[in-house]
Image: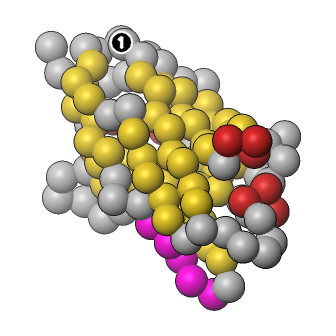
Amino acid sequence: VHLVESGGGLVQPGGSLTLSCEASGFTFPTFSYYEMYWYRQRAGNEREFVAMVSDTGISTTHVDSVKGRFTASRDNAKNTIYLQMNKMNADDTAVYYCSVYSAGIRYWGEGTLVTVSC
């Protein structure tokens, strides 16, 4: 399983950014079977859960600190998940990772850096 995040960069406070994570390497079951996750790691902190999107994309869960601002989604036809981030603030500065748990192994992408600054 291979996960590749993209879309990070510099954004001003109050701004928006959309992250993508393309997954590959699933054999059976396929990508559409799995819950997918977004995590982030801020400097000096442990990696923390941000959002989960269910296999169909119908159900999502977001950590309280991003509720109402971030939205996780997916496109199973593209083997891709997304994280739409709005009303961003300095506390959102972090490396963002996508993740999946498959056959007893948790897989991670390399991460994409998001910096919120004037």
> Which residue is nearer to you in this view: 77 or 112?
77
Position of residue 32 in the picture relative to residue 83 (left or right): right
| Quarter of the picture holding the N terminus | bottom right
Report the span colored magenta: 104-108
Q: Position of residue 60 (x, y in %)?
A: 73, 44
Q: Position of residue 42 (x, y in %)?
A: 26, 50
Could you tell me which residue is drawn at 60 percent across and 68 percent down? 25
Few, some or many residues within 10 Å of mark 1 (<14, 14–19, 20+): some
Could you tell me which residue is drawn at 26 percent across and 42 percent down? 113
Q: Position of residue 68 (x, y in %)?
A: 60, 25
Relative to 41, say whether 89 is above or below.
above
The local secondary structure at tag 1 comes to: loop
Relative to 55, say whether 83 is above or below.
above
Could you tell me which residue is drawn at 46 percent across and 34 percent down? 19
The answer to which quarter of the image holds residue 104 is bottom right
The stretch drawn in magenta includes residue 73: no
Kindly report the secondary structure that dominates the magenta region of the rendered protein: strand
The answer to which quarter of the image holds residue 89 is top left
Could you tell me which residue is drawn at 57 percent across and 56 percent down? 23
Visual colour scheme: secondary structure
Q: How many marks?
A: 1
